[in-house]
Image (tube, grey):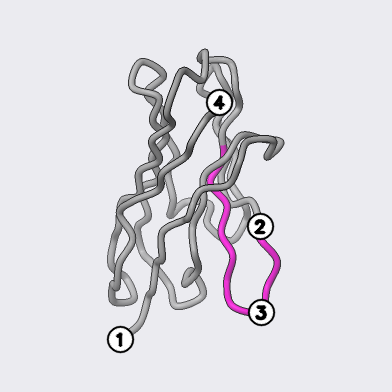
Amino acid sequence: QVQLVESGGGLVQPGGSLSLSCAASGSIFSIYAMGWYRQAPGKQRELVAVITSGGSTNYADSVKGRFTISRDNAKNTVDLQMNSLKPEDTAVYYCNARPAYLMWGQGTQVTVSS
């Protein structure tokens, strides 16, 4: 089965930047649309960014202009560059396909606080 491992989270001040990485074991066959999701305390998991197999991207309004999703199909990785971070971005971040039909990984904690 495909395993997803997220990394790169941490504590950052408001306005700072952070880069997250998602590594998938096995081949994703370069055909899945992939997304980054996040779950903040007391909230449902939400989709924040999507990248199609062809490289087209879409973002939630809350992160548009600040986050950039990218993928490297040869490496089976999906990255999320986060800039101008806000406290409201604090959440556990997960990657998965879109729709989310792969098994969830552990996620990586992003905390934005001064």
Q: Nearer the viewer, residue 26 or 96?
A: 26
- Looking at the rendered structure, the kind of residue marked 1 is Ser
Asked whether 44 falls inside the magenta stretch, the response is yes
Question: Which residue is at a point 35% across and 15% down the rendered structure image?
Answer: 74
Above or below: residue 24 compared with residue 107: above
Q: Which residues are magenta?
A: 35-45
Q: Do the numbered discs 3 and 2 sit on residues whose CB atoms are within 8 Å? A: no
The disc at residue 114 is 1
Q: Is residue 93 above or below residue 71?
A: below
Mark 1–mark 2 CB contact (< 8 Å): no
Mark 2 or mark 4: which comes first in sequence?
2
Cα–Cα gap, marks 3 and 2: 12 Å
- Does residue 58 appear left or right of residue 70 in this picture? right
Which of the numbered marks, if any, corresponds to residue 56? Answer: 4
Name the secondary structure under disc 2: strand
Q: Residue at x 40, y 40 (%)?
A: 22
Discs 4, 3 touching: Cβ within 8 Å: no
Give neighbour class at mark 2: few <14, some 14-19, many 20+ (Cα, 10 Å): some
- Of circles 1 and 2, the one toward us is 2
Question: Which one is nearer the viewer's eye here, 73 or 89?
Answer: 73
- Residue designated by label 2: 46
Count of marks, rendered view: 4
Q: Is residue 114 magenta?
A: no
Secondary structure at badge 3 equals loop
Quadrant in the rendering for residue 69: top left
| Labelled disc at residue 42 | 3
The amino acid beneath tag 3 is Gly
Residue sitting at x 69%, y 35%: 101
Query: Left or right: 97 with respect to 7?
Result: right
Residue 53 picture location, percent across and down: 56, 19
